[in-house]
Image (cartoon, grey):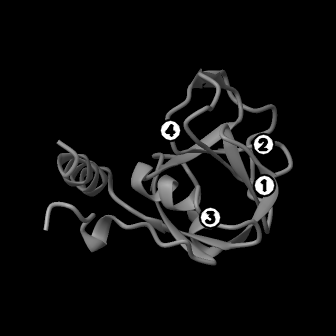
Amino acid sequence: DLRRVPKPYIPLYAQNVKLRISLHNNASEEILSQSYTLSQNISAMGYKLQGKALSVKEGGIISEGIAFGALQVPPDGQPIILLKERQSIGGYENVGTVLAKDCFALAQAPIGATVTFESIEIKEAQKEMKDFYTFFD
């Protein structure tokens, strides 16, 4: 039936959100073993998580372009997932990129939701997103 959204494309407004992340080459995998809480510090720019602080490079990094879903780690070690209204460049350490499809689910999660991460290879992420956007063509 073309008048209904197929079930796989209906978002779940869940208390527990698992985000798939493509980690950068030199990024620590410590984020994969942690559980975070969605803080009240959220906006269309990004969602800040609360939990065990991640290790960060002292002094930050040279500013670089920021992708939708980038996971930055500011000096306090609490990760920030950058969304649609993010800045164009930034200087916090960027440890990886959350799959855009999963960012849409995160945007629907309530404050206090539990957030965990699972690694996804870049080729698999590209296929997943191609399939996702093909549905809307």
For label 2, the crowd category at 10 Å Cα-Cα, with few meaning under 14, some 14 to 19 and many 20 or more, is some
Give the labeled residue for mark 2.
74
Q: Are marks 1 and 2 in contact (CB under 8 Å)?
A: yes
Q: Is residue 132 left or right of residue 30?
A: left
Query: Which quadrant would the C terminus be assigned to in this image?
Result: top left
Q: Residue at x 76, y 71 (%)?
A: 112
Residue 68's disc is: 4
Give the labeled residue for mark 3.
31
What whole-number distance in Å separates the C-alpha atoms at marks 4 and 1? Answer: 18 Å
What whole-number distance in Å separates the C-alpha atoms at marks 4 and 2? Answer: 17 Å
| Secondary element at tag 3 | helix
Across and down, in percent, residue 28 comes to 59, 57
| Secondary element at tag 2 | loop
For label 3, the crowd category at 10 Å Cα-Cα, with few meaning under 14, some 14 to 19 and many 20 or more, is many
Image quadrant in which you'd find residue 32: bottom right
Amino acid type of the residue that numbered disc 1 sits on in the rendered structure: Gln
For label 1, the crowd category at 10 Å Cα-Cα, with few meaning under 14, some 14 to 19 and many 20 or more, is some
Amino acid type of the residue that numbered disc 2 sits on in the rendered structure: Pro
Residue 78's disc is: 1
Across and down, in percent, residue 31 comes to 62, 64
Image quadrant in which you'd find residue 58: top right
Q: Nearer the viewer, mark 4 or mark 3?
A: 4
